[in-house]
Amino acid sequence: MRTSVGIIGGGPAGLLLARLLHRTGIDCVVLESRTRAYVEERQRAGMLEQGTVDALRACGAGDRLNAEGLVHRGIELRFDGERHHIDFPGLTGGRTVTIYAQTEIVKDLVSLQLDGGPTLLFEAQALAVDGVEGGEPVVRFLHEGRERTLSCAYVVGCDGSHGIASAALPAGASRAYAHEYPYSWLGILADVPPSCEELIYARGEGGFALHSMRSPSVSRLYLQVPNGTDPADWPDERVWDELAARFAVDGDWRLERGPVTAKSVTPMRSLVREPMRHGRLFLAGDAAHIVPPTGAKGLNLAVSDVRVLAQGFAELHRSGSSRLLDRYSEVALTRVWQATRFSYDMTKMLHAQPDSDAFEARMQLARLRRITASRTAAAELAAHYTGLPLAL
Ligand code: APR
Ligand code: PHB
């Protein structure tokens, strides 16, 4: 097989990139190692920045998002038994965020792609990328029991945090900056209407808790747990009791409980690869960077990466100039580092330190109090949460 842009990975980054390229007349092929059912069912985050929503609408993937997405005008911060609303439109000149699950975005993009879009092969596992320093890189992949090759002008690794694209970077070509956090999130999906209108980020006595949602009848909740936690040690009643304790406030508020339909534990880390390009190989989304989920930047960064990349390819296709494509890593990383810093600070501000450092706990409260007391500090949080502009 031969194509202009070979895309490894059919998650949100790979699928949106394919869509954007297709719309500018650039041909591409997406190789996805899993089945369609698997990628469409995988539970991930679901908070979309305004720019992410705009990008999905602009590429024709906005119908269900417009009908089913829940527009949120703020978040609630809870600590010390108090509740504080952070008003996004008021603090950012009108920006909002939208709740719409990543898995729904994937379904929308897959159906657009299979309906006359560029080639998307499921159960096509990329094995290696060769020749990225030369003129025509080749992706070797397994499909229907045999090894095949895809020759491309460029390869984009959108293959997530455990993909093979980043491994194709020769030693010294790119550096990984990483940070591990001493806690994980236990997440549940429950068939119960959300107990809140906007997301609640709580710094509870026993640690962090987040109340999110998927729809008016499905709640998504998370609890900070120690690394290495086995979900089997957390029967549903224990999860609900702990959530209720961490969300407790002075005054009237009740956490509604319901049947738990999914439960899993996710470790947290930050990682940034710099640069996000080597020769004819580009990295985008989780293949290039990981953020902890506090602040929900992972999906939004994947979208902003591929928007920059698609514009670079479009300029090259239109005018023959690689000026923008050559700036991809620099432009994308400006935003990536800001989101990395934001997620890191949100995480450190809201999670209990396992060694219960009393001084650090006071620092967390001082940061939270500053955000709720100062319009400037709140506006800073709102600007990052709703998403910084692309610095093209
Ligand atoms: N060959 C083909 N496909 C592969 C390979 C491979 N060798 N390795 C991984 N993949 C596929 C995975 O099966 C997955 O569908 O690449 C895809 C990567 O998708 P995501 O992990 O969803 O990553 P990305 O598209 O960058 O989206 C980022 O996902 O992890 C979340 O929080 C993150 O929300 C963010 C979003
Ligand atoms: C989610 O809905 O899954 C979600 C929302 C906000 C976050 C993290 C996850 O910060």
Image (cartoon, rainbow, N blue to C red):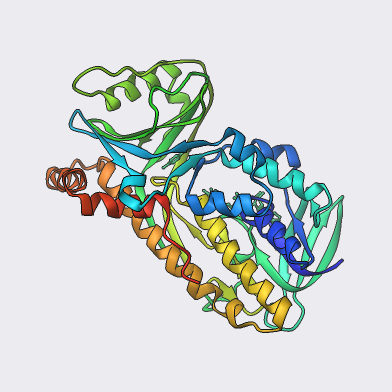
Q: State whether residue 113 appears in this view.
A: yes
In the picture, measured across the screen, residue 72 lies left or right of residue 303, that is left
Compare residues 179 and 14 and report the one nearer the observer: 14
Q: Residue at 25% across / 49% down in the picture?
A: 378
In the picture, measured across the screen, residue 332 lies left or right of residue 268, that is right
> Residue 201 sits in which quadrant?
top left
Query: x%, y% of residue 183?
Result: 35, 42
> Residue 107 sits in which quadrant?
top right
Rendered position, 68 above or below 273: above
Number of numbered discs: 0
Query: x%, y% of residue 301?
Result: 50, 57
Rendered position, 132 above or below 373: below
Q: Residue at 65% across / 35% down in the picture?
A: 41
Q: State whether residue 42 appears in this view.
A: no
Compare residues 377 and 4 and report the one nearer the observer: 377
Query: x%, y% of residue 124?
Result: 78, 53
